[in-house]
């Protein structure tokens, strides 16, 4: 696989010769921000023809001015795979020594907050959290409320490949099984004993709308976790995942501590029979994830403006970090909606769903049982489930569990598209659920077609 095109080829599952790209010159200097065209496609990488911006600004240098085409091969002044990985893994948020630069609380304040947190009333905690997040609207990147920079980079490169090669269309393996237009999943993080005790009622609500979710359970110190409790979740068709170790905000404090805790977390993975993991409060370090023996992780937000750790992966699709599949959180979690934004409507969620549906990604939600015990929050959650159920019927939305997304994305990653001309087929396990799609240009926009059933113009 051509090295600089590997991320694009892996995402689309197209043939290697469909993305002819080479580097134009030697990459040098420090990585920085740039844009690819005027569509808002933001990248972060080293460049060869110019110096990228050290900070995100409104008028970023445009790499498209430095792209040339020779014999049908696009010559790029940056490595797309490096740029995509840097955004997905939030390397743009790292300082030169590799430490994460930006937390809503500073390091000292963060340690002090978690030291006294158990003693603080809920109202005091929420006041402190709103104060720490007071500047969230002024953060220009990632773009609120959903950032699709990764998808925009890849779509623009497909457009470039079609133009430079003279092809009418590019075949690829569609993103979701049975030609589903997009995917949706609901996850429940169980933070307290009260939340644990509400899980049976929460499963009843989910079942009212034929939605199966995953429950992320804190294994140590927070509350008693009985085998009977875990078995009820599994018996009813829901998933059990591990949620941090003790949810004290210190999992990623330093590498030695993480190594120690990772051993305990991995033991709980076995006893819980869990395949997935989510860190407490969405603290994360992608470079350490492979010390955890899980198939998938649910800890990285698309846009983290309302979370303790800032940043965001800027993608609405799953992606691999080593052997771990990251399924990003692409919708604002319920806690932030209710208690930071003080919003009890579906307006924000609907805006996020619309953008994700338009680009065929995965819309993922955190609904805490701890914050769904009251009637008002239950009403909002029921409205969300009704809305997703309607999209399942009318828009071809695949409403599923994270474990099924993991299974499908891994199967799809091992499939191969073979053939030529108008004769294409998919090989590999699970191919009976896969669909061949085509990307083509119509009036300068990238359009997807699946078996000529429907088409969609991607606003890349």
Image (cartoon, rainbow, N blue to C red):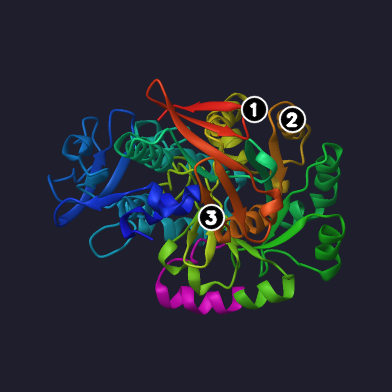
Q: Which residue is mark 1?
A: 344
x then y, percent, for residue 140:
33, 34
- Give the SS element for disc 2: helix
**Circle nearer the viewer, 3 or 2:** 3
Q: Is residue 259 rendered magenta in the image?
A: yes
In primary-sequence order, the first of circles 1 and 3 is: 3
Evaluate if marks 2 and 1 touch, with contact meaning CB atoms under 8 Å apart. Answer: yes
In primary-sequence order, the first of circles 2 and 1 is: 1
User: Between marks 3 and 2, how big is the CA–CA gap?
Assistant: 27 Å
Q: Which residue is mark 2?
A: 376
Neighbourhood count class around disc 1 (C-alpha, 10 Å): few under 14, some 14–19, many 20 upward: some
x then y, percent, for residue 147:
43, 37
Evaluate if marks 1 and 3 touch, with contact meaning CB atoms under 8 Å apart. Answer: no
User: Between marks 2 and 1, how big is the CA–CA gap?
Assistant: 8 Å
Evaluate if marks 3 and 2 touch, with contact meaning CB atoms under 8 Å apart. Answer: no
Residue extent of the magenta highlight: 247-265
Q: Which residue is mark 3?
A: 299
x then y, percent, for residue 90:
37, 53
Q: How many marks?
A: 3
Q: Quadrant of residue 292?
A: bottom right
């Amino acid at each position: 696989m051509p090295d600089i095109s590997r991320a694009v080829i892996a995402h689309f599952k197209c043939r290697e010769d469909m993305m002819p790209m080479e580097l134009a010159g030697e990459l040098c200097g420090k990585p920085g921000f740039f844009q690819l065209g005027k569509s808002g496609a933001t990248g972060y990488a080293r460049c060869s023809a110019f110096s990228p911006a050290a900070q995100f600004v409104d008028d970023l240098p445009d790499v498209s001015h430095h792209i040339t085409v020779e014999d049908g091969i696009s010559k790029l002044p940056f490595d797309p795979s490096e740029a995509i990985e840097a955004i997905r893994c939030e390397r743009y948020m790292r300082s030169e020594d590799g430490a994460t630069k930006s937390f809503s609380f500073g390091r000292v304040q963060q340690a002090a907050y978690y030291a006294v947190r158990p003693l603080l009333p809920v109202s005091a905690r929420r006041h402190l959290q709103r104060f720490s997040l007071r500047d969230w609207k002024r953060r220009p990147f990632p773009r609120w409320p959903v950032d699709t920079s990764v998808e925009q980079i890849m779509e623009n490169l497909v457009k470039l490949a079609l133009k430079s090669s003279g092809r009418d269309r590019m075949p690829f393996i569609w993103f979701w099984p049975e030609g589903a237009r997009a995917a949706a999943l609901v996850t429940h993080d169980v933070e307290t004993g009260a939340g644990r005790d509400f899980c049976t009622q929460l499963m009843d609500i989910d079942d009212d709308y034929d939605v199966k979710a995953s429950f992320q359970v804190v294994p140590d110190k927070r509350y008693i976790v009985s085998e009977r409790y875990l078995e009820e979740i599994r018996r009813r068709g829901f998933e059990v995942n591990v949620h941090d170790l003790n949810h004290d905000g210190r999992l990623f404090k330093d590498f030695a501590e993480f190594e120690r805790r990772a051993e305990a977390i991995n033991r709980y993975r076995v006893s819980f029979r869990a395949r997935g993991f989510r860190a407490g409060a969405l603290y994360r370090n992608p470079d350490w994830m492979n010390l955890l023996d899980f198939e998938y992780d649910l800890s990285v937000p698309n846009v983290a403006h309302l979370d303790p750790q800032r940043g965001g992966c800027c993608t609405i699709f799953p992606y691999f970090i080593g052997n771990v599949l990251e399924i990003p959180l692409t919708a604002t979690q319920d806690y932030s909606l209710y208690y930071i934004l003080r919003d009890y409507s579906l307006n924000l969620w609907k805006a996020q769903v619309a953008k994700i549906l338009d680009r065929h990604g995965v819309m993922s939600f955190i609904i805490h049982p701890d914050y769904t015990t009251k009637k008002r929050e239950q009403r909002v959650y029921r409205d969300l489930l009704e809305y997703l159920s309607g999209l399942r019927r009318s828009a071809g939305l695949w409403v599923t569990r994270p474990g099924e997304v993991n299974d499908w994305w891994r199967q799809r990653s091992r499939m191969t598209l073979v053939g030529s001309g108008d004769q294409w087929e998919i090989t590999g396990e699970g191919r009976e659920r896969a669909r061949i799609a085509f990307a083509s240009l119509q009036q300068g926009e990238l359009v997807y077609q699946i078996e000529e059933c429907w088409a969609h113009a991607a606003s890349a």
